[in-house]
Image: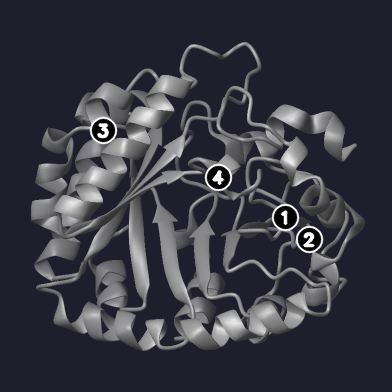
Amino acid sequence: MLRGFPESRTALMQTLLHLPQAAKKREAWKKQDVIVPPILIVSTTDECNLHCAGCYSRANCRGTESKMTKTHIDNLLEQAVQAGCSIILLAGGEPLLSGDWLEAAASRPELLALVFTNGTLLDEARADWFSANRSMLPVISVEGGLSRTNERRGEGVAERVKTAMLLLSERRIPFGLSVTTGEHNINEVAARDFLVPYIKLGCRLVIYTEYVPVDENDTLRILTDESKSALQQFCRAETKNNNMILIPFPGDEEKFGGCLAAGRGFAHISASGALEPCPFAAFSDRSVIQTSFIDSLSSPLFQRIRSESHLLHEGGGGCALRNNKSFML
């Protein structure tokens, strides 16, 4: 995956050495009836410099009056590492506006950290920071070609994103793509021709996130079952044939017995410290500020979702929980 990126390859190998130990920790907690997710997704801040159309993060925004402090963040990451979390996804808002989270994650080589950014704030100084912190992989959001990205994210954004990628490429820093994927753009983005220019710049990871509508009447962009299947096949084929990894998210959860939220595969922490089952489903009955991480994972809401995950069948829009809101009330 990282041929041609020696510094990043070394950092990744050092992080991978911690994975077996993390798995043992999770297994030990499981014997105590505590389910620890391997992946922790964090909305580092509700703040963002863009106003993208149909942004689920903005739709779920609850304000930042109880924003996590640096001490809260450091304590949480210590607990998460000790519990056996091994991958952290830093999202937002815009995570490049949250220096405390970036520095805290960079100080934890046990964690593979993916930073999901819109790319417009990734300047020379931030590119140098990523060069010095190779365990942190920037994952830049695009919607497809230049016009489609500008249409959703704002005029000129696609060009600024390309400049950011060039800055990373100059420093030989690999990066990822995050592509919101629906019926409106799947034929464009699930194609070899779409990937080639990014591969040449240093893209080694592509995450295709299924479109989740924030408006219940917005159904035209939702992936059909046939498109979901085609996307999964495309990701498998391109991962096999190229020096990169392609991941559909959430993918075919039914293979794993239903919804992977609430700790079965991942959990989400809001900018205010609420532990939530999924970034698309803003429901919570525990705060990691008020309760330890381990105790929060055993909340009644999480226990119910995990025990009845087989009943949560995905409807339209990529998120089983969002389509079964009554289940969590």
Left or right, 98 with reference to 233: right
Local SS, label 4:
helix
| Mark 4 surroundings: few (<14), some (14-19) or many (≥20) residues within 10 A | few
Residue under the image location 82 percent in, 52 percent down:
307
User: Whole-percent x and y of residue 160?
Assistant: 24, 44
Residue at x-position 79% and y-position 31%: 325
Q: Gap in Å between the C-alphas at discs 4 and 3?
A: 22 Å
Q: Residues under labels 4 and 2: Cα distance?
A: 38 Å
Work out whether residue 216 or residue 249 is closer to the camera in this orientation and state it: 249
* Contact flag, marks 1 and 4 (Cβ < 8 Å): no
Foreground disc of the pair 3, 2 = 3
Vertical relation: 39 (above or below) 283 = below
Numbered mark located on residue 262 in the image? 1
Residues at badges 4 and 2 in contact (C-beta under 8 Å)?
no
What amino acid is at disc 3? Ala
N-terminal label among 4 and 3: 3
Q: Nearer the viewer, residue 236 or 213?
A: 236
* Mark identifier at residue 190: 3
Q: Distance between the residues labelled 2 and 1?
A: 22 Å
Give the spatial CA distance, label 3 vs label 2.
40 Å
Sequence-wise, which precedes: disc 1 or disc 3?
3
**Disc number placed over residue 66 in the picture, else none:** 2
What is the C-alpha distance between the residues marked 1 and 3? 29 Å
Q: Distance between the residues labelled 1 and 4?
A: 17 Å
Q: What residue type is labelled 2?
A: Ser
